[in-house]
Image: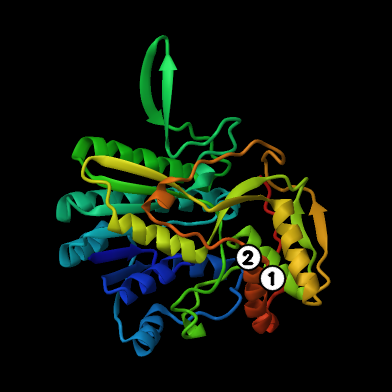
Amino acid sequence: MKVLVLGVDGYLGWPTAMDLANKGHEVWGIDNYLRRDLSRNLDIEPLYSIPNLSERVRIFKDVTNKEITIRIGDLVNWSFISSIFHEFKPDVIIHYAEQPSAPYSMLSREATILTLNNNIQVTANVIFAVRQYSPEAHIIKLGTMGEYGTPNIDIEEGWLEIVHNGRKGKFLFPRQAGSLYHTTKIMDTDLLWFYVRMWDMQVTDLMQGPVYGLLTDESMLDHRLLPIFNYDEVFGTVLNRFLVQAVIGYPLTVYGKGGQTRGYLNIKDTLNCVRLSMENPPGLGKLRIMNQLTETFTVNQLAEMVKAVGDTMGLNVRINHIENPRKEAEEHYYNPKHTGLLELGLEPNFLTNESIHKMLDTIIYYKDNIQKSSIFRNIKW
């Protein structure tokens, strides 16, 4: 298939592009380096230096003899995105092209406005470009489990049947975001659902939990192909942060009571979920929603797992409960359904002591690059 990966420079975008190109698809990747620019402005560096996209595709071709076409530009700009769709006419659009950080979205008024403008305008432009140039294309949007919040009922896969005054209806599951970033993801879902109804588009919305890990099949061939790996409070996911903290003797920063429960998945499973969604499109006029996670953990459980493995490696890991900078429930019910992707054939890579050990080994290799000052910024909301 002809696959357009939006946000190809990101933590998930780059591994996705490599995976699909390596499997024989024709892949174009689009990015404007927004995440790199925001990180640089905040004096935040990833665990290791990342080549620019032109260099990344050269390395990828040398290693695999497969090609990825890169275009640099801002998807908020209609002239740019329309020219891409006019030239490429993709069969599938994988939409990662958003400001991806909840803490960043809560940092300041300016950060909030940037997040709103970027995320909503990009999604709207994607919808209109599909309508004009590739009306039968399949949009795969990476949503987030954070759209649901932590309701005191089971979280269904996107939809909920309601009986009210003797009548029954099916509605999008109620959303209650915990950050401005997650609010924009809710807006994405609403926009896509509106245009599915109006224009018979076909969309898969993958409600993804926090992702962890560094290694994929392609990056194991050459470490220069590793994804951007942040360990800071702004752009780093919780388990990735804990792993880096463990390596340098920085006490694991557990917010509050540590009972916050979320659904997690290995980066390899993100790639498999996207591929399975591509291979099994929902059909025109449908919005398919699947919860993309493989297992749930509390923050305390993650911290204890990292400590247990780290201690066997001589890291002497400590855990520190700190005042929670976020406004969130620290103990709550959490039971998300996630059968859709399993039914499509997902074979999960579960979090084990062995996988934690392997991630710690990789991080230890880059230990000298770690900047302690980047880890905790105490962004409050």
Mark seen at residue 69: none
Secondary structure state at the residue bearing disc 2:
helix
Residue placed under numbered mark 1 in the picture: 244
**Where is mark 2, residue-wise?**
240
Q: Going 70% across and 64% down the picture, which residue do you hit?
A: 242
Residue at horizontal 49 percent and vertical 42 percent from the top: 183
Question: CA–CA distance between discs 2 and 1?
Answer: 7 Å
Q: Which structural element holds mark 1?
A: helix
Residue that protrudes farthest toward the top in the picture: 165
Furthest-bottom residue in this view: 62
- Which of 241/281 is in front? 281
Callout 2 touching callout 1 (CB < 8 Å): yes
Q: Is residue 76 visible?
A: no
Left or right: 327 with respect to 252?
Answer: left
The image quadrant of residue 248 is bottom right
Amino acid bearing label 1: Val
Image position of 327 with respect to 252: above or below: above
Q: Is residue 253 visible?
A: yes
Q: Residue at 45% of width from left, 76% of height from top? A: 217
| Quarter of the figure that contains the C terminus | top right
Q: Is residue 264 left or right of residue 95?
A: right
